[in-house]
Amino acid sequence: MSTTNQTGRAIVLGGSIGGLLVARVLSESYATVTVFDRDDLPAEAADRKGVPQSEHSHGLLARGRQILEELFPGLTADLTAHGAVPVDIQRDCLWINDGHRIPRVASGLAGLCVSRRALEAYVRDRVRALPNVEIRDRCEAVGLAEGGAVTGARVLPRGGREERHDAELVVDATGRGNRGPTWLAELGYQPPAEERVDPRTVYVSRDYRRAPGDTDFAAVISSPSPEAPYGGVAISAEGDRWMVTLLGVGPDHAPPVDSEGYLAFAGRLPAPELHALLSRAEPLGPPKRMRLPTSQRRRYERLARLPEGFIAVADALCSFNPAYGQGMTVAAAEAIVLRDCLRRGRRDLPRRFFAAAAKVVDVPWDMAVGADLRHPAVVGPRSGRTRFLNGYVTRLHAAAARHPVVGRRFLSVANLMTPPPGLFAPGIVARVLWSSRPSTPAPGGRPVVPQVEELVAR
């Protein structure tokens, strides 16, 4: 970590993964960094009120693991020593998309199976150990301070009186329920436009005891499809546990919360390994239900007028359907964007950051929202581009079952390691189109293979 030219003070509102990663990055540029969080932050790994999704299945995508290892050298080894499971995303995991299995071969995509609470506790300890970072819990952010720019934040300690803290930069990392747009409106700024899609998805999660060596896979991911709007995941975790989440899209497909119904629901999935696992594994607690909140993206980059001294990150900027496991990795990528922006100076920082962060968010947002909009129960605008991409990805899943290289490319894009145009590389397109060719040959005996232009038009 560079310690040169550290000047001024930065404040981070929110001490979850996104806020902690930003604090780590800010510690390179600011003399002091203070993180405020309204929760009682646990001393050890534990679920907490401010992270309601913590009890459900989590894992770290390849790009997320790569960034966290860069920011906190030794993270993978440390967490592995405490029971987390490092994986090759393709070789060690069962992926079933639209009923099609991705062949299990080595991919070089390195992920990490670890619970949210264990990962957050580890990152919090590493950030707390930084000499110029302070973490204060039981302090709720209630507004911004302004004097021609955002010059600080107003914070209410639990049981105390409101405090004003001055800073050159305030970062809103307060999560899905943040009030950043309201705070800006109070200062006379236009709130950002918002895009929303309700995934209408219900999670039911349960932990099970994991017997080392009982399976030859570390995770199962069976995604829902319009024809079968239910899915499930099982992810290895520390403590010799399986984190299991079953999900249904639409009001008629929610997983049951009773043990017998939960097991029967798993039996509907095109992943018999998951049902077999739950049939023999010992439950470690009751099933826990969660109705997923609306996915929401705030378009700060489109505002004509932005105050200096304020940015928003992680779920305060864009919150995804967590079924796709992108949230922590996107937050990590945004932290790297902020670091790169700061290395080019602080002038016009919010505008530069929001513009660059939008490019990072575009990919997972399009993938998650596009996948959600495949389901008739999900309400939202379906553009021609969305229909084309969904049609192409449907064909790609079928091709991936036959061609490991197609599966690897899909997983590389989904793990934010390869830009989406990689899905349209000539070798990938050829396999996708060949795999989806009609069985009826054209005159002359050659199969009819649709062209990309035809797919775009559909």
Image (cartoon, helix red, strand yellow):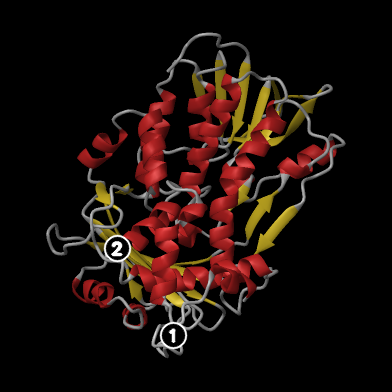
In the rendered image, residue 329, in percent from the top left (x then y), is placed at 46, 45
The disc labelled 1 sits on which kind of residue?
Pro
Q: Which residue is mark 2?
A: 404
Q: Residue at x 39, y 60 (%)?
A: 427
In the figure, is residue 400 to the left or right of 279?
right
Would you name the residue on which mark 1 appears? 438
Q: Secondary structure at mark 2?
A: helix
Q: Residue at x 26, y 46 (%)?
A: 84
List the single residue furthest toward the right.
188
The answer to which quarter of the image holds residue 397 is bottom left
- Quadrant in which residue 150 is drawn: top right
Rendered position, 96 above or below 67:
below
Q: Are marks 1 and 2 in contact (CB under 8 Å)?
A: no
Instruction: Using the image, tell me which numbered label, if any, was put on residue 96.
Output: none
Relative to 291, is 14 above or below? above
Question: Disc 1 and disc 2: Cα gap in Å?
Answer: 22 Å
Residue 89 higher or lower than 137, as above or below: below
